[in-house]
Image: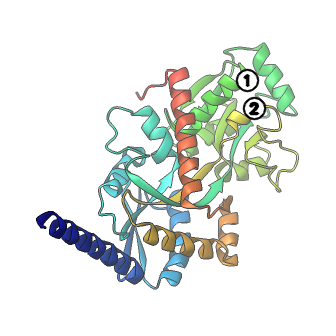
């Protein structure tokens, strides 16, 4: 009899917890939602986060307040978000840097696990990467000629990136692995200085986000050889994708998405994702993203989780094969 009573009590309590959880999800959100951006204000991550969450706020009926928590390549903000209560009121923005590159480069001292500590909501937007050359230092007319020059001159040419063990460094090393070429990495403290030296001829090759390089490509100060994107860019119809020229492993765009802490109820996650999809279909949001050189996504939590895992595995492989270490 005692066992039956205990079982009945457990069932009642369990049903009560489920009911309470469902009611909480039904009422969500009842107050402002904090969104941690793990980088400084003004960059692409911050701009895209504010653009999409502002429109999401209208759908959810509560403000989504962006809070910038930069430092350590995004690790400080991501770690704080990972430790937040899984109630949907503290979210964070995911990037390739925070979810793939940083974990791959810092496997032993990163204060969060990119797979276990987060519940993906949706990918907001994707942005293309590009490899470009200084036309005076490398007067090549297309990717084939570019590759031929590199193969005939191992170790002669240098490429710049935004920093050691950043996503653009890994893209450069992925390029070297895929093409069997030998080019020397020159790390910079950000894309801006690297771009300036590529234009000035201090380095011959640059791996960069397309929005950063586009003005100089349009001015013909640097020439684009290939882009990391599913299809050719409409404003650069003559520039092939890495997949087109036979190197799909390098065809890795960057993305900006929304995360909740692990354990957040799926009713809440789905409500957030639905609001994001509405936002990403808004013509004003689409236009603003296009001006940033980005394309809206809005995939499902499951699809975004696979996207994160795939990019993390890619980053780990490059770091291991090229023996990349943070300085």
Residue 296: percent from left, percent from top = 66, 63
Q: Is residue 56 above or below residue 184?
A: below
- Neighbours of disc 2 within 10 Å: few (<14), some (14-19), many (20+): some
- Residue highlighted by disc 1: 179
Q: Residue at x 44, y 33 (%)?
A: 105
Q: Is residue 111 left or right of residue 243?
A: left
Mark 1 vs 2, N-terminal side: 1
Q: Name the residue: 46% across, 34% down.
A: 104
| Residue at the image point whose x is 51% and y is 51% from the top | 95
Callout 2: SS: loop
Pick the residue in front: 136 or 292: 292
Judge by depth and name the residue closer to the eye, 319 or 167: 319
The residue pinned by badge 2 equals 247
Q: Residue at x 56, y 28 (%)?
A: 318
Q: Is residue 225 above or below residue 292?
A: above
Distance between the Cα atoms at labels 1 and 2? 7 Å
- Indicate whether 236 appears above or below 222: below
In the picture provided, is 214 more to the left or to the right than 261?
right
In the structure shown, which secondary structural element does the residue marked by tag 1 occupy?
A: helix
95 shown above or below 299: above
Report if the CB atoms under discs 1 and 2 are less than 8 Å apart.
yes
Q: Where residue 106 sits in the image (x, y, percent)?
A: 39, 34
Q: Position of residue 13 (x, y in %)?
A: 23, 72
């Amino acid at each position: 009899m005692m066992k039956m009573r205990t079982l009945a009590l457990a069932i009642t309590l369990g049903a009560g917890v489920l009911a309470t959880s469902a009611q909480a999800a039904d009422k969500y959100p009842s107050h402002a939602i904090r969104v941690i951006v793990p980088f400084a204000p003004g960059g692409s991550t911050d701009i895209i986060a504010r653009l999409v969450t502002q429109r999401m706020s209208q759908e959810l009926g509560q403000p989504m307040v962006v809070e910038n928590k930069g430092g350590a390549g995004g690790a400080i903000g991501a770690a704080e978000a990972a430790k937040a209560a899984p109630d949907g009121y503290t979210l964070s923005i995911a990037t390739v840097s925070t979810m793939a590159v940083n974990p791959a480069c810092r496997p032993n001292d990163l204060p969060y696990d990119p797979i276990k500590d987060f519940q993906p909501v949706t990918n907001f937007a994707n942005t293309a990467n590009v490899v470009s050359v200084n036309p005076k230092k490398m007067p090549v007319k297309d990717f084939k000629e570019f590759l031929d020059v590199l193969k005939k001159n191992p170790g002669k040419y240098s490429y710049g990136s935004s920093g050691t063990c950043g996503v653009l460094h890994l893209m450069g090393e992925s390029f070297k692995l895929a093409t069997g070429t030998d080019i020397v990495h020159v790390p910079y403290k950000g894309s801006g200085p690297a771009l300036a030296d590529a234009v000035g001829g201090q380095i011959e090759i640059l791996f960069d986000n397309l929005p950063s390089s586009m003005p100089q490509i349009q001015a013909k100060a640097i020439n684009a050889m290939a882009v990391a994107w599913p299809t050719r860019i409409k404003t650069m119809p003559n520039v092939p994708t890495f997949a087109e020229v036979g190197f799909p492993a390098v065809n890795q765009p960057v993305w900006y998405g929304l995360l909740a802490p692990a354990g957040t109820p799926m009713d809440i996650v789905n409500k957030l994702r639905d609001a994001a999809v509405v936002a990403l279909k808004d013509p004003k949001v689409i236009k603003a993203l296009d001006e940033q050189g980005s394309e809206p996504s809005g995939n499902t939590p499951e699809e975004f989780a696979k996207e994160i895992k795939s990019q993390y595995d890619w980053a780990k492989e490059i770091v291991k094969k090229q023996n990349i270490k943070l300085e």
